[in-house]
Amino acid sequence: MQRLFPTLLLFLVVSGCSTVPTYAPQHLNWPQREAALQQITAWQLEGRIAIRTADDSWSGSLWWQQLDDAYEIKFSGPFGQGAINLVGDQQQVVLNSSEGEMVGHDGAEQLMYEQLGWRVPISSLRYWVLGRPDPTQSSSLLEFDDFGRIQSLQQGGWLVNYRRYQLFQQLDVPGKIAIKNHQLGVKLVIDHWQQPEKT
């Protein structure tokens, strides 16, 4: 019995470990990876976000759905406090919060800055969260890891560092991102990627 117990314990440990899913990064060169990422035009993510300025900080949950150029973004603080909802496209954006509804025609960044004091680069973040540069920006400086994924990105006055990747639609996509410029810092942890349900 004394010999049987260590053997049984080892079997249980090994069996438990074998059920943990493994993630093997893909080896792709950047042109191949970027071409594949460009095909993802509809996605949905859930995670956590922290925003810090020189005078203030905020953290909470994040839900984002992108369908081509149309998007819906929900920010929510602890216990649902400070909930903010953004719905927009290339024509206009509507922001709903405890203060009421505001409509803007100059983009989500300008509306959020006017109402909340945050100049978060929503239009570029749409691409950055997928692990690719914003194609509307004229220039970018990229550094890659050993798997051909972006490790750091400088674009439009922002520095984007990719700390972790995960798998979505058979592609490596970011799981943890840090974004900053001289005025603001954003940390984003993506817990779950999925394909949006058809409406």
Image (cartoon, rainbow, N blue to C red):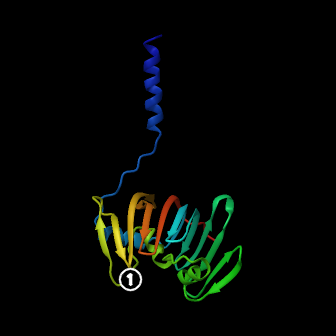
**Which residue is located at x 35 percent, y 71 percent?**
153
Q: Is residue 8 above or below residue 19?
A: above
The percent coordinates of residue 48 (x first, y second) are 54, 60
The percent coordinates of residue 154 (x first, y second) are 35, 74
Q: Is residue 154 above or below residue 146?
A: below
Asked whether 133 or 194 is in front, the reply is 133
Q: Residues within 10 Å of mark 1 (few under 14, many from 20)?
A: few
**Which residue is located at x 62 percent, y 77 percent?**
87
The percent coordinates of residue 121 (x first, y second) are 48, 77
Residue sticking out furthest to the front: 55
SS label for mark 1 = loop
**Which residue is located at x 61 percent, y 69 percent?**
74
Classify residue 46 as left or right of residue 169: right
Q: Is residue 52 above or below residue 108?
A: above
Amino acid found under the numbered disc labelled 1? Gln
> If the image is split into quadrants, where does the C terminus sit?
bottom right
Asked whether 195 or 109 is in front, the reply is 109
Q: Which residue is mark 1?
A: 137
Asked whether 162 or 72 is in front, the reply is 162
Q: Quadrant of residue 171?
A: bottom left
